[in-house]
Amino acid sequence: MPTMPSALSPVTRIAVSSAGSATPATTAPANLTATLTHHAASGPPPLVGGEDAAAYEALLARVAGAVAPVDVLEEMWVRDVVDLDWEAQRLRRLQAALLRVAAHEGLAVVLTPLLGLSGAHDLAARRVRALLAAAGLGHDAVTAQTFAARIGDFDRIDRMIMQAESRRAAALHEIEFHRVLLAQALREALAAEHAEYEDQEDEADEAFDGAVPGSHSHGAGRRVRRDQ
């Protein structure tokens, strides 16, 4: 690969060095601290009550280290990827919490055939466990009935999870597409630069051959070697 001009920016140097590879480097960037600082400056983490800020920052650091963003656009997409993944995790926790808080609905459905509607709402936990055991039922039966009672809510949460994961995949695709376009543009720019340099060499050779008698083979020899 030709030597990169010193005027290229660090971002351009990274893209040029990976232009010949279909897969960009996934090692942690040297400016990982600066990248995380940039994300911190773009706004606070999208956390709700009870969520672990340290876990979010650890996820951000791991994703930034894996993707190794090379410019501000990729840094923005990395933040999107992390936020969307965090959102999908939150929705899954919400599903589990919904099963817990709505368990009384499923329990009422399970106990009603055993005790009648009025008796199903007035039982202590110990009596409930005994009745379930006597009927050959476990907590799975309560969970199943709870899920059935709230299946519309679970279906909506599932769709929200799929949307978050789809947007996360789109952000990762944007990073990949951005790198392909950047590498292609850099390859074309370097090819044009080298072609222009060779044209200048040819002009200089022709001028030299015309100015110095008996030197007509000088430029031709250089052109032949270059063509080879």
Image (tube, grey):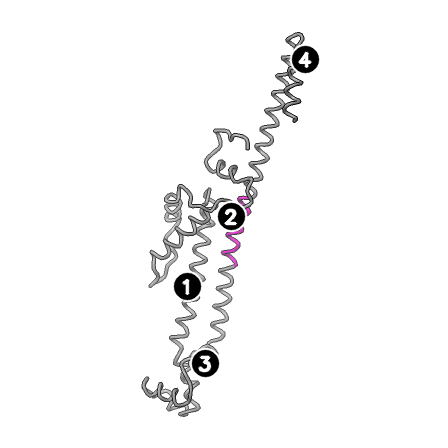
Residue 212, percent from left and from top: 64, 8
Q: Which numbered mark, 2 or 4, is in the foreground of this view?
A: 4
Which residue position is annotated with label 1?
A: 90
The residue type indicated by label 2 comes to Ile
Residue 147, percent from left and from top: 46, 77
Query: Is residue 28 shown above or below 196?
Result: below
From which residue to which does the magenta span run?
Answer: 166-179
The residue type indicated by label 4 comes to His
Residue 223, percent from left and from top: 65, 21
Q: Which mark is residue 145?
A: 3
Alpha carbon distance from label 2 to label 3? 44 Å
Which residue position is annotated with label 2?
A: 175
Describe the element under mark 1 as helix, strand or loop: helix
The residue type indicated by label 1 comes to Arg
Residue 91, percent from left and from top: 43, 65
Describe the element under mark 4 as helix, strand or loop: helix
Alpha carbon distance from label 1 to label 4? 76 Å
Dot 2: few (<14), some (14–19), or many (≥20) neighbours within 10 Å?
some
Q: Is-magenta flag for residue 177?
A: yes
Dot 3: few (<14), some (14–19), or many (≥20) neighbours within 10 Å?
many
Q: Kindly identify the residue that appears in the image at 53 percent across and 44 percent down.
A: 179
Q: Which mark is residue 66?
A: none
Mark 1 / mark 3, whichever is N-terminal: 1
Are circles 2 and 3 on residues that touch, CB within 8 Å? Answer: no
Quadrant of image for the N terminus: top right
Which residue position is annotated with label 4?
A: 216
Alpha carbon distance from label 1 to label 2? 24 Å
The residue type indicated by label 3 comes to Gln
Q: Is-magenta flag for residue 57?
A: no
Q: Is residue 171 left or right of residue 47?
A: right
Q: Kindly identify the residue that appears in the image at 38 percent across and 87 percent down.
A: 133
